[in-house]
Amino acid sequence: MNKGYSKKIFHMNRFIPILVLLLSSISLQAQSPWTQEKGGGFGQLSFMSIPTYNSFFTKDFEDASRISDQSYTEIGAQIYVEYGILENTTIVLDAPFKVLNASEPNVNPSPLEAGTLAGLGNIRLAVRQGILTEGVRLAGQLLAELPTRSQDDATGLRTGYDAWTIQPSLSVGGGLGKGYIYGYGGVGFRTNEYSTFWNVGLEGGYNPFEPFWAMLFFDVYQSFEDGNRMDIMSYRESGFYVNDQAWASLGIKLLYKFNDKLGLTASTTLAAFAGHQVPQSPSLAIGVFTEW
């Protein structure tokens, strides 16, 4: 590999970790095989919205959808930081904050209530270790998700899973000229009678001109349906962080870097299918990042 190409790929690799932004009621997860340099890192502040919706993907009905008696709206902010503590070893912090709203029920009388809930979502801490660090990249990651969340039984609003989660995963990928591609896969284990789940995905990006990147991602999240958790009716109606959620989604992400330290990201889902207990509504996120 010539020096110019090596420099280009290294420059691109500094971008990769901030590009993994999965937009749904579940917050982002960074799954790339690239690690930060020792002492290097970046921080990102992003804002997400899922506009008002009342329909859900479900496998329990023939038409694969469910209509709720209430409408829901989600907005949120998220702090995401990566830092290279050792050469090829990176630590990750992901801290979301969410504001949720449930409308007045469409039927009267109803056991459901309207309301608004604001609070932390599930804080995530992870360690990513580079295994192959030249050419084709391979990394392992161990993620811990804390049971930080707020919830309101009357409205069915909840900002995170009521459980601890441990998720080991592997990712592999590399640079391809003016682009990159990588895939990832892992299994998550949740406490409090939630089911075990598996998560796999693929992402590719292209750099048409130096400050700008365009990326496509495909992500699949499926439950093993081995848990016994049964939430009360208000949560089953709202779908917020209930057991056995699942989806397959296709999305696009854009990145523009103003200078060596500052840039913008934007992301949205293009299509979602094969889902269960997740909104039938597009989502949008924008963010600003800095790196050092």
Image (cartoon, rainbow, N blue to C red):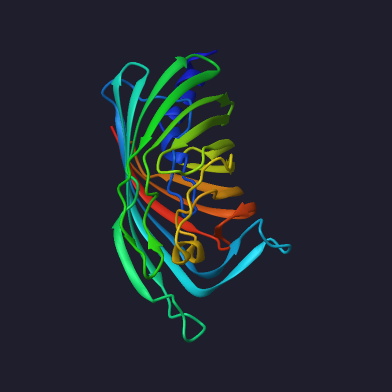
- Residue 4 higher or lower than 233, as above or below: above
Residue at the spot 51% in from the left edge and 46% down from the top edge: 228
- Residue 266 higher or lower than 232, as above or below: above
Residue at the spot 40% in from the left edge and 27% down from the top edge: 142
Answer with left or right where residue 179 lies relative to residue 87: right
Q: Quadrant of residue 286?
A: bottom left
- Residue 62 higher or lower than 258, as above or below: below
Answer with left or right where residue 152 lies relative to residue 245: left
- Position in image of residue 126 (x %, y %): 36, 31
Task: Assign the N terminus to one quadrant of the image.
Answer: top right
Q: Residue furthest bottom?
A: 108
Residue 105 seen in this snapshot: yes
Residue at the spot 48% in from the left edge and 37% down from the top edge: 210
Task: Assign the C terminus to one quadrant of the image.
Answer: top left
Q: Quadrant of residue 95?
A: top left
**168 or 45, which is in the foreground?**
168
- Position in image of residue 125 (x %, y %): 33, 35
Tag count: 0
**225 or 9, which is in the foreground?**
225
Q: Quadrant of residue 182?
A: top right
Residue 261 seen in this snapshot: no
**89 or 245, which is in the foreground?**
245
- Residue 223 higher or lower than 151, as above or below: above
Answer with left or right where residue 202 lies relative to residue 256: right
- Position in image of residue 147 (x %, y %): 33, 45
Residue at the spot 33% in from the left edge and 16% down from the top edge: 87
- Position in image of residue 22 (x %, y %): 49, 46
